[in-house]
Image: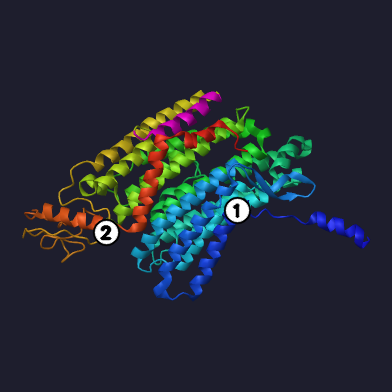
Amino acid sequence: MSVQAAQPLAQSLVQSVDWLAVAPPTLAALAGLAVLVADLFVPDSRKALLGPAAVAGLALAALSLLPLVGEDRSTFCLTGDASACAYTADTFTLAVQFLVLGGALLAALLSLTALRDADRGLPEGEYWFLLLSSAAGAALLPAARDLATLIVALEVASLPAFALVGLRRGDRRSSEAALKFFLSSVTATAVSLLGVSFLYATTGTLHLTRLAERVQHVDGQFATLTQTGVVLTLVGFAFKTAAVPFHFWVPDTYVGAPLPVAAYLSVVGKAVGFSGLILVTVVALPSYADAWGPALAVLAALTMTVGNVAALRQVTTRAFSAVRLLAWSSVGQAGYLLVPIAAAGYSDDPGRAVGSTVAYALMYAAVNLGAFTVAALVGRGRPRNRVADYRGLYTAHPLTALLMAFFLLCLAGLPPGVIGLFAKVTVFSAAVDAGLGWLAAVMAANVVIALFYYLQWTALLFRAPAPGGATAPGGTAGSTGTGSGTGTGTGSGTGTGTGSGTGTGSGDAEGSPVGVGAGSAAATPPGAGAGNAAGVRAAVLRLPAPLTAALAVTAVAAVVLSGAPQLVLRFAGGGLF
């Protein structure tokens, strides 16, 4: 071949990269690499600077979405077919990337305080690198338009998350949670890869748009292999969404992980799974809607029912029951998120149906991260973080209690949590419009079930504090109030910490209310209540700035969305792809 003939061929194989389109995941990845390198040279006394640097990197990645609004951009396209691209930044991509990067940013704010409180129990450099790496993979996934990029992005988002869950040194519960999460996710990946390999073998392409065309014209002798590939691919993504019966890892993983990581998984992890499932079903396999539509409808019904019933059965005095309830609640919410995707299988406009999932996910992200932020505040004074520990929170910290009540009402779908109500109505309408009346009835029944435990928790916030003091949401373990009484208890400890001393203490082994001696004292010292209240107020004044910022951001987001629900509900109008 002559040099002149070879040059056009070589030029046709060179792809130009749209750096603006790929900026969000690229900036998150570069920030992670920068933090990892800096960790090698920064002395231990300056490690705390890595956190603000990571937060700045995530904020910059989120801001890079602004120039992309209002236009569709694609890159890494086949030279002979501009419609077959590996990366596309459209409305769906930008909405999910905003959710992912915003959720990661709020999780990073929670992590600043968690790392400081851990007192080097969590390695800072590794923690920030893993969080940023996972966020980069999560931001890449909704833009993926071929199965190879989709699987790679899925693993880049998942693999660092395993390590984040088990990063606490010497914590058996954390190690067990990481192992369960790892085994379930590896199984999901193996199943997905097997399904993808079957689809590639029968269609000869990995690009989603080409796959959608070729899968309809597979030779008859390969039909069974193709159907098996479709089933395995969908099962793999069902693991990632924590849909029943692939949900068993969720409660223990959330409890064993550092609380900011649990918050991250509850929002960003779900966004990853659901965006991948939407791309595989609606974009790549619309011709198999008669198969995946009914299957996802059944999964949605099972998931919301199991999640809400399990949340309903949580014992409020059990250790970490608050985190467990949020974990089971997230499983129930996953069922609601599945409903519009299932409805897309029955709809002539599947893009419009899955828009309800995007709208609901944006609402859920804001209010659920707000609930986890309050849990982080309470957990600083109550390491065992029981639901019972929230009793009387309004007495100690009225604003925090009001915000927690608002977040719970949004999740329940009750006024004044208007955005939760409208989001649920949107999902409900998607099921009705698709002719899935039975699924709409199941959803309505589950909304009623969920009302009980959300309202029970909300009412607990405003009850009188339990004998022994009020909840201190912002103090550290061992925070005490001072009283004028001289009564003593019969606890087994001395001083402050685990028993009842001479009028002060920090609760028993099960996490009794922080403040006055709560061991097994037979009498409460006179004046202890006033002293405890003073101690609580002092603790509230010392709320860490990052937690305060996270609480303010989630509160403003929830209030704004309740006042202007069309900001997210417009995604239910279609036009995502």
| Colour scheme employed for the rendering of this structure | rainbow
Residue at left offset 51%, top offset 24%: 432
Q: Which amino acid does label 1 sit on?
A: Ala
Dominant SS in magenta: helix
Residue at left offset 54%, top offset 43%: 95
Residue at left offset 26%, top offset 61%: 477
* Picture disc at residue 542: 2
Left or right of 226, for residue 408 = left
Residue 335: % across, % down: 48, 37
Where is residue 448, by image quadrant?
top left
The residue stretch that appears in magenta: 416-434
Decide if residue 253 is in sight here: no
Q: How crowded is mark 2: few (under 14 residues within 10 Å), some or many (20 or more)?
A: few
* Picture disc at residue 153: 1
Q: Which amino acid does label 2 sit on?
A: Arg
User: Is residue 213 within the magenta segment?
Assistant: no
Residue at left offset 52%, top offset 28%: 430
Front-most of residues 406 and 314: 406
CA distance separating discs 1 and 2: 40 Å
Residue 350: % across, % down: 61, 32
Quick one: SS at disc 1?
Answer: helix
Left or right of 542, for residue 338 = right
Front-most of residues 59 and 333: 59
Q: For the N terminus, give its image quadrant.
A: bottom right
* Picture disc at residue 286: none
Compared to residue 125, the image places residue 269 above or below, namely above
Residue 129: % across, % down: 50, 63
- Total numbered labels: 2
Left or right of 525, for residue 364 = right
Front-most of residues 270 and 5: 5
